Amino acid sequence: AQSVTQLGSHVSVSEGALVLLRCNYSSSVPPYLFWYVQYPNQGLQLLLKYTTGATLVKGINGFEAEFKKSETSFHLTKPSAHMSDAAEYFCAALPTGFQKLVFGTGTRLLVSP
Amino acid sequence: KAGVTQTPRYLIKTRGQQVTLSCSPISGHRSVSWYQQTPGQGLQFLFEYFSETQRNKGNFPGRFSGRQFSNSRSEMNVSTLELGDSALYLCASGDSGETQYFGPGTRLLVL
């Protein structure tokens, strides 16, 4: 069965520093991959997605992610963190042929001034 | 386009009661999925409906059920509530593609 692993339940960065949130999926057939962000007391907002084509995907709010099939990874990055980026981030996979997202356990991003 | 709406936003129930949650998808979307989010288990898939038919189901007991109406609105029902059912219930809608768009959720507290 498909699974998604997010390394690090908490990541702390300073404002202006690079953000790197890690995600690995377990599948010999690459699924569709997504990053969602959740702010307190809110639902999930789609940041970006990878389906096919270009392996470097750009999303909203300056985030991007690179799909690496050889490493089964889909890490999320942002060159310069902003205080408003503090939230919980979820990586998710959609196995081919199923409308059932499989989520990682989430990474809480803390941004300090 | 308006986003996914869920009602109510907050609910308090007692053990043994039942509850019905509602979700209105984005206009034109025919797929509605439900997820449960808890601190211990994270985000777990409950079920997915497409054109009034349940297409996928997660590993939840039969107390959890759902349905979808002809206008794509969906309801989720939980009968005989248990303390462990306290969670944020998220609804997501999708078109014929692969992307799911989430609503703000309904926070259920079972006492």
Image: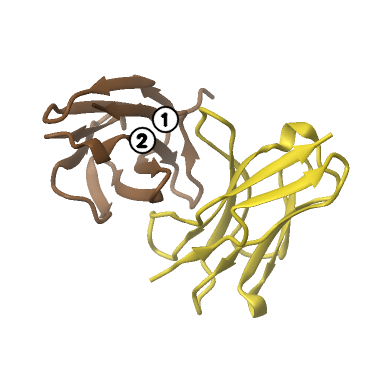
Residue A34 place in picture, x, y as percent: 57, 53
User: Mark 1: which secondary structure?
Assistant: loop
Look at the image and tell me in which quarter the C terminus of chain A lies: top right
Which of the chains bears the disc numbered 2? B
For badge 1, the amino acid type reads Gly
Q: Quadrant of residue A60?
A: top right
The extreme right residue here reads A16
Q: Residues within 10 Å of mark 1 (few under 14, many from 20)?
A: many
| Quadrant in which the N terminus of chain A is drawn | bottom left
Answer with left or right where residue A81 lies relative to residue A73.
Answer: right
Chain A palette colour: yellow
Where residue B62 is drawn, which disc sits there? none
- Check disc 1 and report the residue beneath it: B105
Q: Secondary structure at mark 2?
A: strand
Which residue type carries mark 2?
A: Tyr
* Nearer-N-terminus badge (2/1): 2
Quadrant assignment, res B14? top left
Tint of chain B: brown
Report the residue at 48% width, 44% height from top: B100
Image x and y of residue B31, in percent: 36, 42
User: What residue did someone put label 2 on?
Assistant: B89
The residue depicted at 40 percent of the width and 36 percent of the height is: B90
